[in-house]
């Protein structure tokens, strides 16, 4: 057999996917991957059935169906404060990951550099590097979620072409403030960089914290690419439906790239997603209340077990330090929790450029039905008594 692509020779399964695979093999409880096992709202499922029964199952435009882009333009304006033309500045994508792949392909050349904040979402870093785009990591202090601004300025070089921001942040639950985003925007302007904002957790914020979109601030819209999707807000992770907005010239190329990679997002699912915009405000309020209760449940239990962790501001992930636990490192914690408690987490090293920087942390996801979370804690508790 001839050698495989050099670009893929060093690829390994992500820590998140590996945790899920091993958990599935033993029928455990998965606190690793953000699978969102709560039901998709009935109104969306009913709309999907209706679309299929009406034979809306053929190829759609590579930009996505226009009614959905129109609905997204209204949502972006009302919720995010972003003005985007549905004809030229919005593309419906094959998940937010498909949006990210298409954007990276559109914006960057091999040899360009992008900056990620660490701990980072591994798919961001790995997708860039798969396309020969280098990444530099700038640290976020897990004690208070502060950014190493000096480190960010030092990381920017003549090769730097982009900064990636995930807010609310996977894996640490930080919500970037308006002031922080403006500072990032100013650095991007001064150094002629793009900013890609992954806002997939935009509706999951906790009291005292507000989701802000960089593209809504000052004059940053012309250099900001905003990515989001339906997976997390509506418990539709398996539907793979996302979207991206940005300058028309960029979106034109993003659509062409998507056409090559994916042809189009799944057509009946796009029609189904229209129903999401009919959900009342109470849906979002109840979702936040539910996740807040789960955050508090898991945070209190983890602190009781000896972990150290900050108060999460958004999303549904906890980066917990092993401080006063019986675990020597993150791999020991992973093995003990999986083999003895049948509960999967993700090792901290999965979120760091230098794995040694993450060995004292684990990531826990609480995007599950509360009864499953309570069962997981019941199975874990004996390890700490």
Image (cartoon, helix red, strand yellow):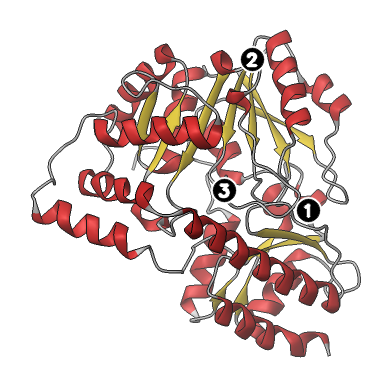
CA–CA distance between discs 3 and 2?
A: 24 Å
Q: Which mark is residue 358?
A: 1
Left/right placement of residue 303 relative to residue 276 reads right
Residue mark closest to the camera, 1 vs 3: 3
- Relative vertical location of residue 220 with respect to residue 270 in this rendering, above or below: above
| Residue 24 visible | yes
Q: Residue at x 44, y 31 (%)?
A: 244
- Relative vertical location of residue 153 with respect to residue 79 in this rendering, above or below: above
Q: Which residue is mark 3?
A: 201
Where's the N terminus, which quadrant?
A: top left
CA–CA distance between discs 1 and 3?
A: 23 Å
Q: Earlier in the sequence, mark 2 or mark 1?
A: 2
To which quarter of the image does residue 370 belong? Answer: bottom right
- Judged from this view, the residue extending furthest toward the right is 324
Left/right placement of residue 190 relative to residue 213 reads right
| Residue 130 visible | no
Q: Residue at x 50, y 81 (%)?
A: 26
Q: Which residue is mark 2?
A: 193
Left/right placement of residue 271 relative to residue 16 reads left
- Where residue 211 appears, as percent x and y from the top left, is 64, 41
- Relative vertical location of residue 140 with respect to residue 333 in this rendering, above or below: above
Q: Tell me the element at label 3.
A: loop
Viewer-closest of 124 and 204: 204
Q: Residue at x 28, y 33 (%)?
A: 64
- Where residue 61 appears, as percent x and y from the top left, is 21, 29
Q: Which mark is residue 212?
A: none
Where's the C terminus, which quadrant?
A: bottom right
Viewer-closest of 172 and 348: 172
């Amino acid at each position: 057999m001839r050698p495989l692509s050099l670009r893929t020779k060093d690829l390994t399964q992500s820590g998140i996917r590996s945790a899920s695979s091993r958990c599935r093999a033993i029928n455990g409880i998965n606190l690793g991957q953000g699978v969102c096992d709560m039901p998709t709202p009935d109104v969306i499922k009913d709309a999907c059935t209706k679309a299929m029964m009406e034979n809306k199952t053929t190829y759609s435009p590579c930009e996505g169906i226009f009614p959905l882009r129109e609905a997204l333009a209204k949502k972006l304006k009302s919720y995010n404060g972003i003005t985007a033309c549905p004809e030229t500045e919005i593309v419906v994508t094959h998940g937010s990951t498909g949006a990210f792949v298409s954007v990276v392909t559109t914006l960057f050349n091999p040899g360009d550099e992008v900056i990620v904040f660490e701990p980072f979402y591994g798919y961001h870093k790995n997708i860039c590097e798969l396309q020969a785009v280098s990444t530099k990591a700038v640290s976020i202090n897990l004690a208070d979620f502060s950014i190493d601004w000096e480190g960010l300025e030092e990381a920017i070089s003549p090769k730097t072409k982009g900064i990636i921001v995930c807010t609310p942040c996977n894996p640490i639950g930080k919500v970037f403030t308006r002031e922080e985003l403006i500072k990032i925007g100013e650095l991007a302007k001064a150094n002629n960089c793009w900013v890609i904002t992954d806002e997939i957790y935009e509706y999951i914020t906790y009291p005292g914290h507000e989701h802000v979109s960089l593209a809504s601030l000052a004059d940053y819209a012309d250099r900001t690419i905003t990515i989001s999707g339906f997976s997390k807000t509506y418990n539709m992770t398996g539907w793979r439906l996302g979207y991206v907005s940005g300058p028309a010239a960029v979106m034109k190329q993003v659509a062409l790239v998507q056409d090559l990679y994916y042809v189009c997002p799944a057509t009946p699912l796009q029609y189904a997603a229209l129903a999401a915009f009919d959900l009342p405000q109470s849906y979002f309020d109840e979702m936040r209340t539910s996740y807040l209760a789960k955050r508090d449940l898991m945070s209190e239990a983890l602190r009781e077990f000896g972990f150290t962790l900050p108060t999460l501001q958004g999303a549904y992930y906890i980066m917990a330090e092993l401080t006063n636990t019986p675990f020597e490192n993150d791999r020991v914690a992973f093995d003990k929790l999986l083999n003895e408690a049948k509960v999967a987490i993700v090792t901290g090293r999965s979120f760091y450029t230098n794995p040694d920087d993450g060995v004292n942390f684990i990531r826990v996801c609480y995007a599950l039905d509360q009864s499953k979370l309570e069962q997981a804690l019941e199975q874990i508790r004996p390890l700490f008594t």
